[in-house]
Image (spheres, rainbow, N blue to C red):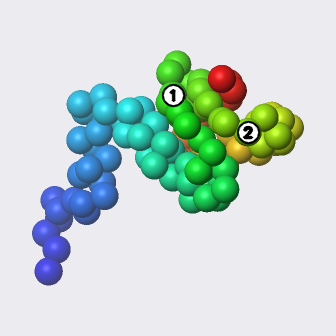
Amino acid sequence: MRKPNDVTLKDAFGKMLDVYRLRRKFDETSILAIWPEIMGTAIANRTTQIYIKDKKLFIRIESSVIKNELVMVRQGIIQKLNEHAGSEVINEMIFL
């Protein structure tokens, strides 16, 4: 039986992230972790470096052909990654 002041674990965890100002870093880390699942193993295996700084996703990819393909669909990728995070974590992609 639930008491009136009980909070779900999801809500408690969300409040903790907000109170300690860790929400943005948590969302960034979750995007980096989900990169292979969203992009597929072929692209993930050729990604040598990936990080987020100031709402910009920096990606280093070995293959120039894949890099050119990703440049063409960058807005779709940004949208998918932000949907996964549930907020706008990335607003630009930069290929190194």
Figure check: 20 above or below 31: above
Of residues 76 and 86, the one nearer the viewer is: 76
Q: Residues within 10 Å of mark 1 (few under 14, many from 20)?
A: some
Dot 1 falls on a residue whose secondary structure is: strand
Specify the quadrant of the image occupied by residue 48: top right
Of residues 70 and 3, the one nearer the viewer is: 70
Figure check: 46 above or below 90: below
- The kind of residue tagged 2 is Ser
User: Is residue 10 visible from the viewing direction of this image?
Assistant: yes
Quarter in which the N terminus is drawn: bottom left
Measured from the top left, where is residue 51 in percent x and y? 50, 30
Q: Distance between the residues labelled 1 and 2?
A: 21 Å
Observer-side mark, 1 or 2, equals: 2
Please state the total of marks drawn on the protein image: 2
Q: Mark 2 points at which residue?
A: 63
Measured from the top left, where is residue 5 in percent x and y? 16, 59
The residue under the point 67% across, 56% down is 42
The residue under the point 30% across, 54% down is 11
Relative placement, left or right, of 11 versus 34 is: left
Measured from the top left, where is residue 31 in percent x and y? 50, 44
Quarter in which the C terminus is drawn: top right
Q: Mark 1 points at which residue?
A: 52
User: Is residue 89 visible from the viewing direction of this image?
Assistant: no
Of residues 51 and 56, the one nearer the viewer is: 51
- The kind of residue tagged 1 is Ile
Relative placement, left or right, of 74 versus 11 is: right
The residue furthest bottom is 1
Specify the quadrant of the image occupied by residue 66: top right
Dot 2 falls on a residue whose secondary structure is: loop
